Amino acid sequence: MPCESWRGKLEAYVDGELSLPETNALIDHMRECGACAAAALGKVQLKRSVATTGKRYQPSAEFRAKIAKNLKTRSERGSGLFWKILVIPAVLTLIFVLGLNYYVGREKAERQRVYSELADLHVSTLASATPVDVVSTDRHTVKPWFEGKIPFTFNLPELRGTEFALLGGKVTYLGQVPGAHLIYRLRKHEISVFIFPDSGGQTSAPSGPIQLRSFNFQDWTQNGVRYFVVGDVNPNDIEALSNLLRNAK
């Protein structure tokens, strides 16, 4: 297929709208075609820039405080015993429900934002001519390479007897926080493993595999670091690699 035909599919690829066979075919093409790989990388970077710019127009803390103060003043003016007895409990219940829904919705939106950014990193890495900075299948070579480059450590699993192969890794960033980006191969597919420090410090079991765009994700927290596994393989493969990482020593 000529490059012009592939170029017409790059937008859909970056947005995760291609079918799995088309995605794999395009990835194979980009490995051989630097021009298409560069074009895909440019589209990913543009998408991330637009998403970052959009955050500048979120309401400020001062604006939210002003609205809350106005609401409080109006409430005090219309206060009375009748309203206190009948209306206030209902209003408090409504506020609680709305607040809970807002918190849950905000947490879900934040998680999807992180997944979307990691999907972009995954795509841009596969489109790059140099996807990793340390090239090795040996975990005892890859792990020490990160020492002094990121502010935490982690363990990598022994892959002997499995279908997974370690290709290497590099330092990456999520919200200006440095972390490790590892690339694994399963059959003809590449899977990204992202590892970042976790400020909460609480251990959590892996979430069930979640699909976003054309990728499956799984994440968990362990020993003060957060793991993310993402790839276009099936959920069982994502979970299998996640379990290997969780039990790594």
Image: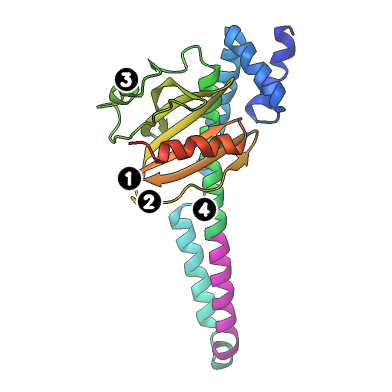
**Quadrant location, the N terminus:** top right
Q: Amino acid at mark 3?
A: Thr
**Mark 1 and mark 2 residues within 8 Å of each other at the beta carbon:** yes
The residue that appears at 56% across and 13% down in the rendered structure is 38
Q: Is residue 129 above or below residue 219?
A: above
Categorize mark 3 by other alpha carbons within 10 Å: few (<14), some (14-19), many (20+): few
Q: Is residue 33 above or below residue 240?
A: above
Q: Which secondary structure type mostly characterizes the magenta part of the structure?
A: helix
Q: CA distance from mark 2 to mark 3?
A: 27 Å
Q: CA distance from mark 1 to mark 2?
A: 7 Å
The residue that appears at 60% across and 19% down in the rendered structure is 40
Residue 221 location (% of width, % of height): 40, 46
| Residue indicated by mark 3 | 141
Q: Residue furthest left?
A: 148
Does residue 52 appear in the picture of this structure? no
| Residue indicated by mark 1 | 223
**Closer to viewer: mark 1 or mark 4:** 1
| Residue indicated by mark 4 | 107
Categorize mark 4 by other alpha carbons within 10 Å: few (<14), some (14-19), many (20+): few
| Residue indicated by mark 2 | 203
Q: Amino acid at mark 4?
A: Glu
Which mark sits nearer the N-terminus, 1 or 4?
A: 4
Which mark sits nearer the N-terminus, 3 or 4?
A: 4
Task: Tell me which segment is drawn in magenta.
Answer: 84-102
Which mark sits nearer the N-terminus, 3 or 1?
A: 3
Q: Is residue 41 magenta?
A: no
Categorize mark 1 by other alpha carbons within 10 Å: few (<14), some (14-19), many (20+): few
**Would residue 230 appear left or right of 148 to someone viewing this image?**
right
Q: Amino acid at mark 1?
A: Asn
- Between 15 and 234, the one lying in front of the other is 234
